[in-house]
Amino acid sequence: MKSNTPLLEVKDLDVRFAVRGGDLTALRGISFSLDKGERLGLVGESGAGKSVAAFSILNLIARPGYIAGGQILFDGRDLAAMSERELRKIRGNRIAMIFQDPMMTLNPVLSIGTQMVEAIKAHRRISTKAAREIALSKLRKVQIPSPEKRLDQYPHELSGGMRQRVIIAIALLLDPEIIVADEPTTALDVTIQAEIMALLLDLCEQENVALMLITHDLGVVSQVTQRMLVMYSGRIIEQGPTREVINDAQHPYTQGLINALPQMGEPGARLFQIPGSMPSLKNVPSGCPFHPRCSFATDQCRQTMPEYVRSGNVDVACYEVSNLIEQEKNMQEAGS
Amino acid sequence: MTTATLSRWNRFRESFLWYSFRRDKVAIVSFLVLILMVLAAVFAPLFAPTDPYDLAQIDIMNSELPPVGMQGADSAFPLGTDAQGRDMLSTILYGTRVSLLIGFGAVVLQAALGILFGLLAGYLGGRVDSILMRIADVQLSFSTLMVAIIVGAVFKASFGNLMFGEIAIYMLIFIIGIAEWPQIARTVRASVLAEKKKEYVDAAKVMGFRTNRIMFRHILPNTLSPIFVIATVQIANAIISEAALSFLGLGMPETQPSLGSLIKSGFDYIQSGSWWITLIPGLVLVVLVLVINLLGDWLRDVMNPRLYKG
């Protein structure tokens, strides 16, 4: 395979929810790509559509949601158009997913070993014994203490951190090419968060697995990912290399997110907040959905959604940014 | 004993179920009484002085003898005899066996249907759910006894009395099982709806499991505790239903008496002073149903305090 075809390419994805009184658009024109072994961050406030984006990649949007348009090309094939049968072969096998709350993702009545063996057997025809061997080797990989013992234990007998390790081991069971991690550390306490994140990063590097990390923690994104997307109200408003986005955020929303991070060294300083809150899907503002909260908003912003413009290696959808770029260009022309 | 079963036993001994059982005197007594009755019924041929199904052992001259301690009693028949000269003790033991068999059988059938339809309705939702639950509603709007009487009468008319005697047990299991499945189906559906929203179900989907597998292997075990509670109460209900049907003459024939048909056969003689033919099986029935219900109550409190009261 040529190295310039991405492993996963999402093109113009629209996801809607059919509710009484018409459809609500949860994702609008989402486009991004993920290369083999690449780590991509997806950030935004609650309600921005991050989790919907994660689920739609596996074509697992639950009714009344549905994929209204666009393509999800994985290895050249469109997941949005695939039959349930074909999708099952990919889910868990080639694309794995890790959820937010390790307390809830493991089935409380089945032992860890049973759950792992089942996951393997759903995709491969091997004996239970061989499957247990694989399970054990993956548990070793996630550095769980006394892995043999864990196989016969039930989820309630493990701590939160251990459970998340088990979940990562389950995600790795079938050597997937992509792991989608939906806020994998939010439910854990801070020291364990760092451990789990470091583990996940290590494993992805070792096994050359692409990681799509969904989080609202910009600190984690900046440490772990190579590229990032910023979502707002179902749209991607800024995407590019993580370092550039974090160091020189273009979109006023991204700037707001970064400024809202608590800084060390200024005791007593008030935290910055972006005024207002994420609009609900039922009344998304016209034009740029961020305009009611944006201090740069103009009439143009209120009427039409800006197109993407390129600033450095970053794509941004903002009139303010495109106007600045325009001005710069004019000044350069005037100067020459 | 292998290590796996040994560790399972240890797990049970550390469980909340065992803990609360040890602490509940009513539960312990009920459980002991139930076990005693079940053992006595299952091993009836070993305990019973006579075989009530064997006509050669019955002597009509022994009919209507009172229980021991009353005038005219025969020590060979500790609980007296019925109008045909059968030993009451033996008949009750055999009768309890029939009643329990019908109770368990009917609940197994109910549970099989209820679990299947409840899971399908709850998990698949939409049209499947509407159709199955409307069938359940229609079914529940007829009383169990009414359905049973109609079906029983049809069976009796079409097979004749002799043939009916042979299939009566299966017919009763069938009727009571069919009539009561919606109870279990509704409970299962309700808990499936709650389980379906949990993340482990999403995780199972993400892992690429088939729908059947998710339903039966992942969701079903998580809904077992309410099923357990309801099933216990339903055994008692099924035994009562059977007794009622037999009392009305649509249940077990007198040659193969259940507790219900024993009560009925004695009822004809209660005016002539032979109260024991009705009273003793009646007491056995009351005790049996009572202990099952008490155990059901205890289970409900332990496993899920929010469940419906049967």
Image (cartoon, coloured by chain):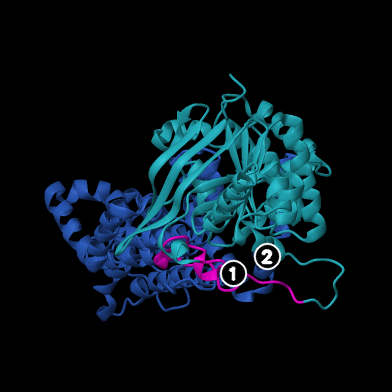
Chain colours: A cyan, B blue
Q: Look at the numbered disc 1 and give the secondary structure of its residue.
A: helix
Return the x and y of residue B54 as percentages of the image width and height. 35, 49
Task: Kindly give the residue lying farthest to the top in the view shown.
Answer: A1
Query: In the rendering, which numbered label is found on residue A276?
Result: none
What crowding class fits label 1: few (fewer than 14 Cα within 10 Å), some (14-19), or many (20 or more)?
some
Q: The residue marked by circle 1 belongs to what chain?
A: B
Residue at the spot of label 1: B302
Task: Tell me whether circle 1 and circle 2 mark residues in contact (CB < 8 Å).
Answer: yes
Task: Kindly give the residue lying farthest to the right in the view shown.
Answer: A265
Residue B77 visible? The answer is no
Residue B63 drawn above or below residue A130: below
Q: Earlier in the sequence, mark 1 or mark 2?
A: 2
Residue B212 position by quadrant: top left
Query: In the rendering, which numbered label is found on residue B16?
Result: 2
Return the x and y of residue A7 as percentages of the image width and height. 57, 30
Residue B151 drawn above or below residue A148: below
Seen at 75% across and 41% down, the residue is A201
Residue B179 drawn above or below residue B276: above
Q: Which residues are magenta?
A: A270-297
Seen at 45% across and 35% down, the residue is A79
Closer to the camera, B42 or B25? B25
Q: CA distance from mark 1 to mark 2?
A: 8 Å
Q: Look at the numbered disc 2 and give the secondary structure of its residue.
A: helix
Main secondary structure of the magenta stretch: loop
Judged left or right of residue B201, residue A40 is right
Q: Amino acid at mark 1?
A: Val
Judged left or right of residue A148, residue A326 is left
